[in-house]
Amino acid sequence: MGRRDAAISDAILKAIFKDKQGKANILLRILAFFSLFRVALARYEDGLFKHLREEVWQLDEDEYRESFRRYDKKVRLRAIGDLGYSGSTFFTTANSKFLIKSLPRRFENTFFQNELLKPYYEHMSRYPSSLLVRITDFLYTPYKALGTLLGIAPSHHIIMENVLYGKSEDPKGDNWETYDLKPVTYFFPERDIAGGRLAPESVKERLIDRFEDKVRVTSHQRDDLVEMLVQDTKLLEAYNAIDYSLFLVRYPAPNGDSEREIPTLPSPTAGPWRDGVTSADKKWVYRAVILDFFWAKHKLEAKAMTGLIKSYNMIDHKGPMSITTSPPEYRTRFLNMVEELFEIVEA
């Protein structure tokens, strides 16, 4: 782990293990301002997230805290690099149960903090088995710092469930597959303009995933997923969220192999698609959640991008982008995409 990642990790862990966030005096605020990497972080709405963890999702609070320690009781997160296009940094806890993702873009972290958080909390409380990814903590910088102003260190982080938990313990972990699925009918400039010459192949390959197979389950299992996604996307549409994705994981089914007992996060309210649904042909186990619901249509960046794409479409009719379309249109295409994933096999 490099110096920057180590400093960010230390700041995250300090926020997690600090029971109360007191007010800093003037000297501490000045010192905090000149921090480049190890910026001060604090838990935002700690009581709200604790209620979600303990009462709604029924996660053990002591086990949650211990997830951030190594088994030798030393504290250190594991950096796993940049997995996206937003410049986010990613860490996992030592036991891989939880994933920490930075939200460096102001329009994303302010949207979640100021507009979506309370509705998210109410939705999760009403639908404990919701397939919106479970966000267990939200960290922010309570004081200004040079590191965040210069973009050197992230100002906000979300801590969420790791849907890939169990992969590192699985002898067939290399056979796990992940798909970050969005409707493929949208226009992607890196892929579609000038024959795709705006970006190298390595970027275009990560731009959009395609699931070339079918999810073979019963109609009941399919309906269980779709009905929950209808409720979840109804919330996202109401708050103008677009460009979210279905994160689909599949791994070879254990089929009685005692050496392949795949662990899941212990939560009575997880639901089958979070714990894992075995395919009708017993070949695969599937997990699914909704990720990346932080892009709001009404934010300035989205408005600017919409205007840019509309101007371009006057010359070359490429159609809407996933980040510029309307929330109802995006939701419709998203749910249609999900429906097309399935091949129904009745027992």
Image (spheres, rainbow, N blue to C red):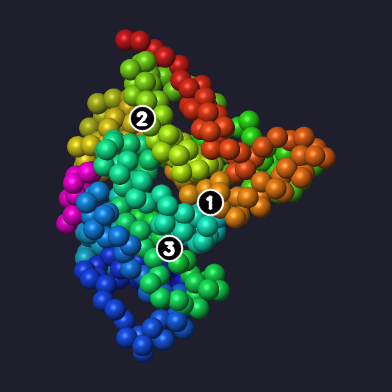
- Which residue is depicted at the point 37% across and 51% down? 117
Specify whether residue 193 is in view. Answer: no
Please state if 56 lies on the left or on the right of 142 as rendered.
left
The front one of 277 and 59 is: 59
Q: Residue 59 lies in magenta, yes or no?
A: yes
Provide the secondary structure element on which disc 2 rests: helix
Q: Which residue is mark 1?
A: 84
Q: Name the residue carrying label 2.
A: 228
- Please tell me whether mark 3 or mark 1 is closer to you in this view: 3
Image quarter (top left, top right, bottom left or bottom right) of the C terminus: top left
Q: Amino acid at mark 1?
A: Gly
Residue 93 shown left or right of residue 344 in the figure: left
Most extreme residue toward the right is 315
Q: Vertical placement of 169 versus 113: above or below? A: above
At horizontal 60% and vertical 50% (from top left) the residue drawn is 302
Q: Who's the residue at 46% across and 44% down the image?
A: 239
Q: Quadrant of residue 44?
A: bottom left
Mark seen at residue 156:
3
**179 lies left or right of 23:** right
Q: CA distance from mark 3 to mark 2?
A: 28 Å
Question: What is the spatial separation of the Cα atoms under label 3 and label 1, in whole angstroms?
Answer: 16 Å
Say what secondary structure mark 1 lies in: loop
Magenta extent = 54-62
Is 31 above or below relative to 252?
below
**Along the line of sight, which residue is nearer the eye, 102 or 264?**
102
**Looking at the image, which residue sits at the far bottom?**
27
